[in-house]
Amino acid sequence: MATPAIAQSEPASDALTLWYRQAATQWTEALPVGNGRLGAMVFGGLGEERIQINEASLWGGSVHNYVNPDAHSRLERLRELIFAGRVAEAEKLTGEMMGQPPLLMPYQPFCDLRLIFEGDVAGTNYRRSLSLDEAVAAVTYDANGIGFRREVIVPHPDQVLAIRLTADRPGKQNVTIRLDSPHPKAMMESVGQDGLRLTGQIQPRDNPANSWSGSWKEPGLHYAAIARVFAEKGTVIAEGSSIKVRDADAVTILFSGATSFRTYKDIEGDAGRQAQHFLDRALGKSYSEMRARHLADHQAIFRRVDLKLGADSKAAYPTDIRIAGAKTADDPSLAALYFQFGRYLLIASSRPGGQPANLQGIWNERLLPPWGSKWTTNINLQMNYWLAENGAMWETLQPLWDLITDLQETGAQTARVHYGARGWVLHHNTDLWRATTPVDGPWGHWPMGAVWLAHQMWDHYRFSLDEQFLRSRAYPAMRGAMLFVLDSLVEAPTGTRFAGKLVTNPSFSPENSFMLNGQKALLTYGATMDLELIAALFESFVQASRQLSSDADIRTAVLQAKDRLPPLQVGSRGQLQEWIEDYPEAEPDHRHVSHLWALYPGQAISPIRTPALAAAARRSLELRGDAGTGWSKAWKIALWARLLDGDHAHLLLQSLLAESTLPNMFDTHPPFQIDGNFGAAAAIVEMLLQSGDDEIHLLPALPKAWPEGRVRGLRARGDLTLDIEWGGGHLSAAKLKSNRTRKVLIRHRERSVELNLIAGRQIQLTADLSIKS
């Protein structure tokens, strides 16, 4: 079909809308909608609309146990080789210790819903938009003197995708609807005069090793989709596997999809029945009723936080033009839009009843997506959820907690079989089948994923002070990760730098390498990130076990082990050392900055409390440089913010917007990888607000480029909500509301004040931190 000519138009300003003058011509220009289980990319074509759909549980492979019964018998030899500096031999040996298979399964696309409009359509006054506040993707245009509007929503309450086609004159809707699938052997058919059905099963597949996706020999998940078409007046006719609507006033299309997935151990569900169940829940409601429920549900979360970074004067320009313009001009309101887009994406891709946000959130059109679109647990999955805390979206965390519950089961088996250890372990990747073994290559022998996720649960408790969550969900995960650490730490032997100290072995600084005897090496013992993660978990476990009056014996063992960890070290260039030795880096500008975990998201390093280590961390960032992938820049923005350098944080944010942001505002690695969206949004908060258990730092890294602004509804540790206003680069006012009666230290630049907070009562502060009466 010919591409329609599209005239330009200027819409009304809307600071919370992405909008464009043209339809998407490729997937990374399309606009994302979702409800945590269903996701869709809306292209906005005139002659043909493509809506590419995902369902969170549709993955390759099948129920599978990845453990390798031969791994433990090689562990002692692996450790000996690493301690002896025979790293090449050690890395070769890991090939016998990998999970079976050594590559995990890929997240899969579901189907396409296509709308073909009659004839060649020439549109004027075209506008394609995504309202972040309403979670509505829309297309409006004029054709032949008629104004047309198309809306797409994916309401969480109703668990369907809904499309609404309207016009400003009656009888002008003429459209053919069909379903397409990228999967072999999928079946498409019409059902009655107004329905379409798609059914199928994931087929066996041999994937190339360079796809970073495993292969499988047996059929896997069943999937099913149902679409129903409702026309107001006009006619609806089924023709083969398509539905044709002619001369209707308006059209509503409801789409429902599901798989046979029940749990990672059970895929015997009835996909067709489940899809019908979701559709039946939606039937009987008008589109306006469904839309109203959708708005109420979405806005209850989204509207908790409001951010203004100066005037919204550039909101009248298309979003792709603004992104392109970020290369040459600062656009503070674009940064504010980017922040809210990150919050929107997390709401759309992670809700109760779905899976956690993966490397692409919930959106994927490829059978072989980049890196399998898995959950990478050496930074990327964790980064996805930083924003859930300070961005006040605690509901989005539920799928992550559910994933961790499952991983404790599979991780306990891996800990026992691979390490002969108690507790649970997780390496650097997992998939729908809850893999916890080493995968991919020698770098897969990084057993710290459980430690990081358990500590992230503790941090959620620090934000929420929800003791029931601590007792029932966080503490069991922390305890299990702690037991694995106690059982897997080994004493560094005589002749090593820290003989007699407790270290990890094998160890790895994700995903970096160093030079050893003129050769590139990956594996080591006691990498800095391991020591930082373990020290943080030691501290949090001691606090949690005392608070819950639990596990005094384990707590004693932890306190004894804590004193035997090697200290963090400053290297010969003044940098925070990344490895146990001051090795030269094979890639000095590597994208990962794993050894700076204790600065962010950890809090052990601080310019105020540990200035020498903070200076070493700063030197590490300077040596690493400002370049990197999108998610790497996001992490560095937060790190510079923690160093209280707002201007450098802003410099990196500008680089991310100008160089690592796709036309639809998705982050690009490249290719598309959503963690940068989430990480950079969380980092923007770190520029405006930082918090500890009993301390709040207002505007700690405010850049000169944001002299005026306000933010409402940010969340701080200690169950606090804050509003902040500033002008001329200085604090103007702040409001704090605590759900607990407690003391807190408020800091702004050189001033600080201790406040007595009363549960439920709001306190207003002036520019000098005085309480406003």
Image: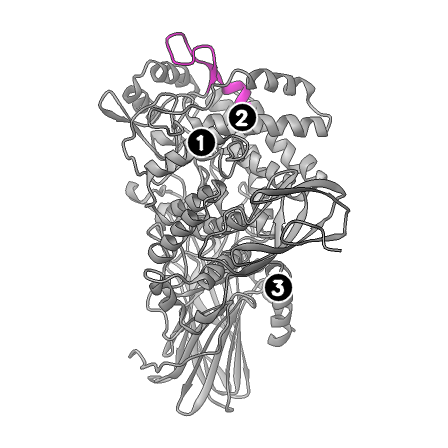
Q: Residues within 10 Å of mark 2 (few under 14, many from 20)?
A: many
Residue 75 screen position, x and y as percent: 41, 18
* Residue 447 visible to the viewer: no
Q: Which residues are magenta?
A: 484-503
Residue 581 screen position, x and y as percent: 36, 21
Residue 666 screen position, x and y as percent: 41, 58
Amino acid tagged 2: Ala
Q: Quadrant of the N terminus?
A: bottom left
Residue 735 screen position, x and y as percent: 67, 54
Of callouts 2 and 3, the N-terminal one: 3
- Residue holding disc 2: 535
Viewer-nearest residue: 503 or 395? 503
- Residue holding disc 1: 437
- Residue holding disc 3: 299
Q: Residues within 10 Å of mark 1 (few under 14, many from 20)?
A: many
Of callouts 1 and 2, the N-terminal one: 1
Q: Give me the residue at 48% from left, 62% from top.
A: 337
Viewer-nearest residue: 354 or 133? 133
Q: Residues within 10 Å of mark 3 (few under 14, many from 20)?
A: some
Q: Quadrant of the C terminus?
A: bottom right
- CB of mark 3 within 8 Å of CB of mark 1? no
Amino acid tagged 3: Gln
Q: Under tag 2, what secondary structure?
A: helix
Of callouts 3 and 1, the N-terminal one: 3
- Rendered image quadrant of residue 379: top left
Q: Give me the residue at 61% from left, 43% from top.
A: 751
Q: Give me the residue at 41% from left, 36% from top.
A: 618
Viewer-nearest residue: 475 or 64? 475
Q: Decide whether residue 491 is among the magenta residues.
A: yes
Q: Under tag 3, what secondary structure?
A: helix
